[in-house]
Amino acid sequence: MGIKTVAIHSDVDANAVHVKMADEAVCVGPAPTSKSYLNMDAIMEVIRKTRAQAVHPGYGFLSENKEFARRLASEGVTFIGPDTHAIQAMGDKIESKLLAKNAKVNTIPGFDGVVKDADEAVRIAREIGYPVMIKASAGGGGKGMRIAWDDEETREGFRFSSQEAASSFGDDRLLIEKFIDNPRHIEIQVLADKHGNALWLNERECSIQRRNQKVVEEAPSTFLDPETRRAMGEQAVALAKAVKYSSAGTVEFLVDSSKNFYFLEMNTRLQVEHPVTECITGLDLVQEMIRVAKGYPLRHKQADIPINGWAVECRVYAEDPYKSFGLPSIGKLSQYQEPLHVPSNQSFNWGCVLTKQSHGKSCVNIKASGEEQLQKKRCLTVERVRVDSGIQQGSDISIYYDPMISKLITYGSNRAEALKRMEEALDNYVIRGVAHNISLLREVIVHPRFVQGDISTKFLPEVYPDGFKGHKLTDLERRQLLATAASLYVAEQLRSQRFLGTPRIPIAESKRSSWELSVHLGDGIYPVAVSKHGSSFSVEVDGMKLNVTSEWNLASPLLSVTIDGTQRTIQRISRNASGETSIQFLGTVYKLQILTKVAAELSKYMPEKAAEDTSSILRSPMPGTVVAVSVKPGDMVSEGQEICVIEAMKMQNSMIAAKTGKVKAVHCKAGDTVGEEDLLVELE
């Protein structure tokens, strides 16, 4: 748009992508959010120093803070968002619920006041009837939210929710409302200007969640019919007009199986998942926000807003999906390659406005603008595979902020096309150095229930009641993986015999063309016979022959392999001299050991390492900060009793005893920073 920008950042984000993209960048403090991204005094000083004219607050932090918007207004700086009245009204869940009722918006039954303490929380919960949802009045993003099914969980939920709310939003007020079991989470995007015009830009389906945080979103929803969509949109616009809302905002609803919908909350900011709306409508929401903030009227009428095609977004997190569907992982991105090169990623032109930006986590101060740039329409080029990320190869994922690596968005003319493109993009996404949730994302989008649109906010715990275990291989897929791994092993053996294209020992050039191998996968050991024919391998597994072909570019992190006509994109994650290798296949990383037949016979004589008895020790399941320790040496603890609380990326997690016993030693104290698998407490 021709607008100069100033990025703010904490000291640990000095090399962040948004810092490099901006025209100027200024550090506003150390890593803790209270001293940097939430430090209004420091941010206001940067605005004065750089003479910024406007501020876009991003997705979180101060984006819904009425005091920040008020301070900007007092100094004549434009806040690219709604005014302070709308932020206050909609940012406070208690007040917003009352306003929604007055605007004839469907609301969830519950207590409309502030809950004072745990005893009052229990009394209110009993009156409403279990289950109930305890949530931060000023909250969002799943922070400060707990579901309680009885009195004990209500007391515990009150404690954790108030602590999380205080640390995330600086406001520990809570409210309680009826928890609607097994709903869908569907939200309506609204866009309003300062001239009384307001539009609803269709819906986003956000039901795939873990810990009340969205994981996969799509637009439109498979569930809504035109009548329900219109009713939800009209109620969302009615609420926006009731608070004189201007800018982009989102009205969230819970929708039950009978298509009854209830107001949940309004987010007075840009949503993380806004790209899927941009894809199907052709509107650039950030550009629209900037235009509205400048005072221009909306350029579109409700009848102009289309649903064109289908878009899906996967939130790629630095998390271990095998632990509670995703506990944070930290580290340096040693290798990072976004899947923008996939063959199906051709763009097309919408022919009206503009597209693709990368939005960082922090505010961006807008320094200068040209009037003509704000009024111009530009063609919106929609990428069929789009990646909005704030990191790059070499970036550090720290304990201080949300563990999101990127938003991966795919677009298609219909849902099947968008999902197929997402599957392909996930297979081609290279992330090394931290754990990530690509295996979970891929399993979700190919699961029959998801493909059929049979989803709710309980999808993950219902589909994976014992936790996520990765992809379960069919017999055919198992043979494909074994054949691919064996072919890769032989290709590496042949490459190691040559240097710069010639044999290492010319007089001893091998003419070998067949190999007998033993491959260990899971609980099974499989004999595999491999023979080479040109650039292809014929592999016999379980008495069946498979033909494996590839370019065998072993230096590439991605390998396209064709197995009996079926194309697969795999990643070889690691290997060592003992034949152990890790291969990402169908999204999941499988550990294999490949040995020659002779080596496999000899390996039987190798001693096995005894497994550690973990029942008497408590290790940290994730990196984070110890918030509280509830025991000391000599204390007796019961199985399931809370031992300590660890906060990681603004979420508090209760660590419990695995058995009844006496505390032998405590290796941490409140305020300590701990890493994954660090020893916390020992029992006798």
Image (cartoon, grey):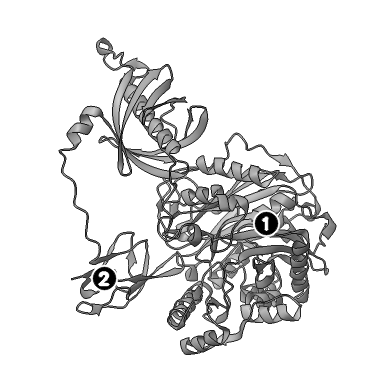
Which corner quadrant holds the C terminus?
A: bottom left
Please say whether residue 649 is visible from this viewpoint: yes
Residue 221 is marked as 1
Judged from the image, the secondary structure of the residue bearing numbered disc 1 is loop
Q: Is residue 3 visible?
A: no
Number of the label disc, if any, that sits on residue 596: none
Counting from the top left corner in percent of width and height, residue 55 is at 65, 64
Rendering coords of residue 515 (x, y %): 30, 23
Badge count: 2
Numbered tag placed on residue 659 in the rendering: 2
Residue at x 36% of width, y 19% of height: 500
Residue 408 against residue 506 in the figure, above or below: below
Q: Is residue 608 left or right of residue 503?
A: left
- Give the camera-side residue of 382 and 379: 382
The kind of secondary structure element at disc 2 is: loop
Q: With respect to residue 477, does 322 lie above or below?
A: below
Q: Residues within 10 Å of mark 1 (few under 14, many from 20)?
A: many
Q: Amino acid at mark 2?
A: Lys
Q: Position of residue 58 (x, y in %)?
A: 61, 61
Q: Position of residue 46 (x, y in %)?
A: 58, 65
Query: Which of these two is toward me, 479 or 96?
Result: 479
Q: Are marks 2 and 1 in contact (CB under 8 Å)?
A: no
Position of 348 with respect to 363 (left or right) is right
- Among the 4 quarters of the image, the one containing residue 151: bottom left
- Amino acid tagged 1: Ser
Q: Earlier in the sequence, mark 2 or mark 1?
A: 1
